[in-house]
Image: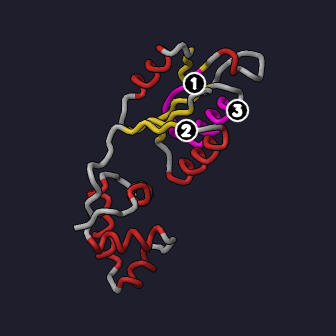
Amino acid sequence: MRPLVIVEGVELAEVVNEFRGRGWRTVHGWDPGGSEWDVSPLRLLCWGVICQSEEAAASIMAAVRGTGIIATLEVEPSIRVRFLEDLHHLGPVDSREGREPQGLILEVDQIRLLDLLTDGLSLPDAARRLYLSPRTVERRLAAARQALGVPTTAEALVAYARHGGRTQR
C-alpha cells in the first residue's frame, strides 16, 4: 500500500529517508512525471511542503495517479481540512507529529469556551453565552492556545477535540 503521510513537528527529510530505505523512489514536488496515468507500479513517492491550494490539488492528483505522498501542511485551516478529507478518501493517512502535548492542562473557563466553539458558536456568541466581554473571551482563548501549544484557534479546537478536554485544573 502506498504511504499517505502528513508530517508535523518532525523533519520532513527524516520521513522521506525512511521510505527511501524501504525501496520507494522519491520525487520532490507534486509531479510524478511519466506518460502513463497509473504510476503505482513504479513505487513513486512525491513529497514537499504544501503552502497553497494549488499545491494541495496537485498533490491529491499525484496520489490519484498512484504515488505515495509525504507532506507538511502550511495552509489556512479551510484548505487543510479539505485536503485531509480528500486524502482520507484515497486511503489510510499516517500522521507523524513530533510535538505531542504531555497531558492537557486547561482551566475550567477555557474548557467551557472551547466546548462552545467546538459546538459551532462564534466568539461573540460564546462571549454572550458566558456573560463575558469579547476581550475576556479573546484572552481566555489565547491562554487556551498557549496551554495547547498551538498558534491558531482552529488548531486549538483540533487539539482539544483530539484530547477530549480530559484534564483540568
Q: Nearer the viewer, residue 28 or 52?
A: 28
Residue 81 image position (x, y, % from top left): 56, 51
Q: Which mark is residue 46?
A: 1
What is the chief secondary structure element of the magenta stretch? helix
Residue interval drawn in magenta: 45-64
The amino acid type found where label 1 is placed reads Cys
Residue 78 image position (x, y, % from top left): 55, 54
Q: Which mark is residue 67?
A: none
SS label for mark 2: loop
Which quadrant: the N terminus? top right
Of labels 2 and 3, the one closer to you? 2
Q: Kindly identify which residue carries mark 2.
A: 93
Q: Kindly identify which residue carries mark 3.
A: 64
At 59% across and 43% down in the image, what residue appears?
Answer: 53
The amino acid type found where label 2 is placed reads Val
Residue 79 lies in the magenta-colored region: no
First in sequence, mark 2 or 3: give its number: 3
At 41% across and 23% down in the image, what residue appears?
Answer: 13
